[in-house]
Amino acid sequence: MELLPPLDTAAGLLQVLIFSAATYTLLSFLRSTRGTGMVRGLSVAFLGLGFTLWLLATLLDLAEVLQVFDLIAEVAIIVLAILFHPELRRGITRLGDHEVLGRFLRRDRTAVIEEITAASVSMAKARVGALIAIERRAPLEAYVERAVPIGATVTRHLLEAIFHPGNRLHDGAVVIRADRVEAAACILPLTENEDLSRTVGTRHRAALGLSEETDAVVVVVSEESGAISLCEEGRMERRVAKDALEGLLARALAGADPVEPEEVRPSPGARALDWLRARPVEKLLALAVGLGIYAGAWRSGRTVVEHDLELRVQASQEGTQLGMGQVAVVAPEALNAGILDAEGRPQPRASATVRVSGPRELLATLGSGLAGRVELASGETGSRELEPTEVRWVGVAEADARALDLAWVGAAPRLELRAYETRTLDLGSDLLPELDASALGAWQADVEGVAFLPSSVRVRAPKGMEATEVRAALAFEPLTLPEQRSDQWREQPRWSAALTLAESARSQGLDLLEPLSLLVPVRLRPQQLEPLPLEVALVSLDPARPDAADQWEAPDATVTLTVRLAGVATGEDALDTSILLGVRSALQERARAFVDVAGLEAETQEATVEVRVPPLRELLGTIPGALEALGELPSDALEARSEPRTVTITPRSAPSQGGSDDDSSQGQEQE
């Protein structure tokens, strides 16, 4: 692998210069701040130790070490922003002080400047020490809130009174905000500039420290010498002439650059040469850092890594919304695509793993999200493998997609492409899906009333498949009827649901071309009473033969009476229980089972007769208990059935056979 990128192009040289200029600007900005020592330490560590380790890791191809360097590079900017946030804040506030932007943001503070100048000159003549901080765009609230609030208009006499040696407020600084003295006795931060002479007092160090921390302009009056100093942007101009102070303050507060003593401006060429000669080590450092940044970015962008992604390949229709991790195979209307499973059976979807190789930066943007779309051409039939190159990948730009190398891990997904035609089928009871009505409780589905909506449907089927074969293959997923409350079913005693094709139908290439629903009527489930045992009695219902029952032996049999109530239940447990108890109580009192022997001849050795039960309405008489609230019952509301349904009876025993013979012989003799 190449160690450094080629620099024989204008684009490469321009990028190195951009990185170097940005680095030099940052170093120049931080040069005079409190972080100077830290900047140098970080620079040495980066160039000495960091660059050396990165060079060795690249030569020896130490992937783990290079990965650590990449992680450090990602967080380096955040770390620097945290370490140098005061300097960065000060630099941002200085943007408004630029001569271009300052023209739009200037404020007329002539009166305030005149009062400050007059007070400073007066105190300098009297050798009264003073420290006046003038707030610009960076707020000085952190120093004001711990001081003595004043809140008065700036005047010469007020400033002289505050800094009078006998005043308790004269030791601290005064903060001026706009045209008001905001606070006095303010404690300012001291500078850490080691280049200052030891003769510089605390008041001057505090003024310089505040100008380093903020964009404030600070006026200092020396108590020993009566000299006036002006601090701005971390620089101090000492022994300012009394007649020049007002002009310097006006320019500083108007946003102009600090005023330097008037001198002859050198030519542009001379200034460029002076700039090149000034701080050569810093410029070489910036150039080295810029080259390192460019080399690192170049190498990172060309490091190839691999990543495996799980995908779901599925047949889809035109307009289907793609989801991450999905590859949609879209076929024309006359063509259908199925995904073959391991056994070679067509399925609507299958899983596959794709290995993506490409630059690390590009794969980092992908994460685990990749989707694709395959548009098949019409007229293509048969089975074949899906190539990664024919997938139009979504989630990456077209230019980035060309930089990726994709290959299937394991077996490639296989497509089965079939030509299709549309058929219209009339739907009947033979195509009804399985219904699960276990959750209906007191209700049940009226299977005889189930209907398809619409009664016919358009089906896409493989070309050449006979109509009988299509009908035999057509099947729907089972339906589960939901649990409903009785009042809902009473208002609308039917339920409808959308039908979906079963997997068995899809595997044979069938597909619905329009929505299809099933309408399922429901009704209350019939209530069945506990079986009631009854003894069978002999009766003769023929008025002409009232004694016919005496000629037969009473059957030694007991039948079981089963009573079923249809359309009586309400779906409310308490009321239904009351109804069942009332019916059962009435049947226990009045129900009878009998056989009618009026039509039988006694000479018969034995006879099989039907067990009969009186009509239930006659047995119940008036509707008892809770049944009264239901009014007239439907004709098929009550149904009774006995088990067994027939019994065998025998005639009663006749006189002895011998006696009969004697009587008969005596009669013959008499004759």
Image (cartoon, rainbow, N blue to C red):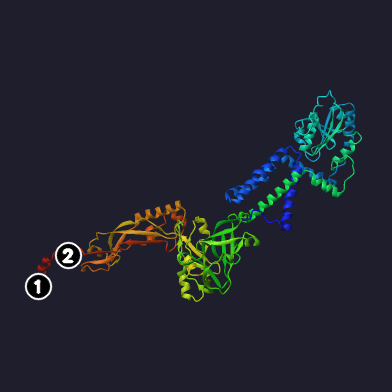
What amino acid is found at the position of numbered circle 1 in the picture? Gln
Answer above or below: position of 136 versus 170: below
Q: Is the C terminus in the top left, top right, bottom left or bottom right quadrant? A: bottom left
Horizontally, residue 389 falls left or right of residue 544, namely: right
At x 75%, y 49%, the residue is: 21
- Where is residue 116? Give x, y as percent: 87, 33
Residue 430, can we see it? Answer: yes
Secondary structure of residue under mark 1: helix
Mark 2 lies on residue: 654
At x 79%, y 47%, the residue is: 276
Answer above or below: position of 132 versus 512: above
Cα separation, mark 1 vs mark 2, equals 22 Å
- Where is residue 590? Give x, y as percent: 35, 56
Q: Quadrant of residue 594?
A: bottom left
Horizontally, residue 376 falls left or right of residue 659, namely: right
Horizontally, residue 316 falls left or right of residue 210, namely: left
The local crowd at label 1, few if under 14, some if 14 to 19, many if 20 or more residues have their Cα within 10 Å, is few
* Residue ranking furthest to the top: 166
- Where is residue 41? Give x, y as percent: 69, 40
- Where is residue 318? Give x, y as percent: 60, 67
